[in-house]
Image (cartoon, grey):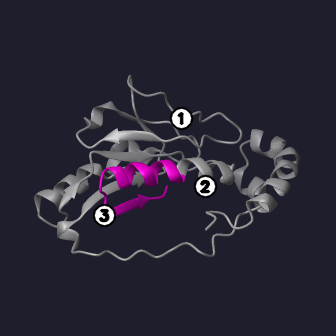
Amino acid sequence: MEAIMNVAAFRARYPDWLEATRPVLEAKNWKEAFKTYPFVVNAHAPWTPLTKPLAECRVALLSTAGAYVKDEQPPFDAENIEGDWTVREIPTDVDYAQLELAHTHYDHARADQDLNCVFPLQRLRELVAEGVIGSLAARHYSISGYCTTADKVAEHTAPQVAMRAKQDAVDAVLHVPV
């Protein structure tokens, strides 16, 4: 199953969209730029129900906040006109003071006050302590929610996260879109 139905059609339309909207993107007029974006179709996204109670599940976090561990990981390339499709793996025991955000396409005011708004790992730790969740994965994932290259996300980013989650025996992933 393709992550993007007819990725060839997306790749055929994308260069023309990028060329036509580059000035609008450079002006940071996102709303206008995405009026003509060649959005992809994901009609066959599989629903995967839990096979055991959440209190027995190992959970990972996937956020589009653009979080990264400062001094250990490079920030996302927030100035790239096409965005950044790479992944940052965040250790489950990370010190929140070490996390920073590199995503310039949303207002960080609330996230600057409480990072849990966009990367709720501390809340997940609390849910483990309360017995609501069985355990947390050793690593969690952050990507930049701004990425115009949907084919790269589907062919590189998503499979990388899925492979790592499988390696960590993750039962459920909490996706926090920003």
- On screen, residue 106 versus residue 9, left or right, reads left
Residue 80's x, y, as percent?
A: 67, 35
Mark 1 belongs to which amino acid? Phe
The numbered disc on residue 143 is none
Residue bearing mark 3: 171
What secondary structure is marked by label 3?
A: loop
Residue bearing mark 1: 76
Q: Tell which tag, 1 or 2, sits nearer the viewer.
A: 2
Residue 93's x, y, as percent?
A: 22, 40
- Image quarter in which the N terminus is found: bottom right
What is the distance, in whole Å, between disc 2 and disc 3 at their CAs?
21 Å
Residue bearing mark 2: 154
Mark 2 belongs to which amino acid? Ala
Indicate which disc, 2 or 3, sits on the residue closer to the N terminus. Answer: 2
What is the distance, in whole Å, between disc 3 and disc 1 at their CAs?
27 Å
Range drawn in magenta? 158-178
Residue 92's x, y, as percent?
A: 26, 43
What secondary structure is marked by label 1?
A: loop
Question: Within 10 Å of the Cα at label 1, are there few (<14), some (14-19), or many (20+) other Cα atoms?
Answer: many
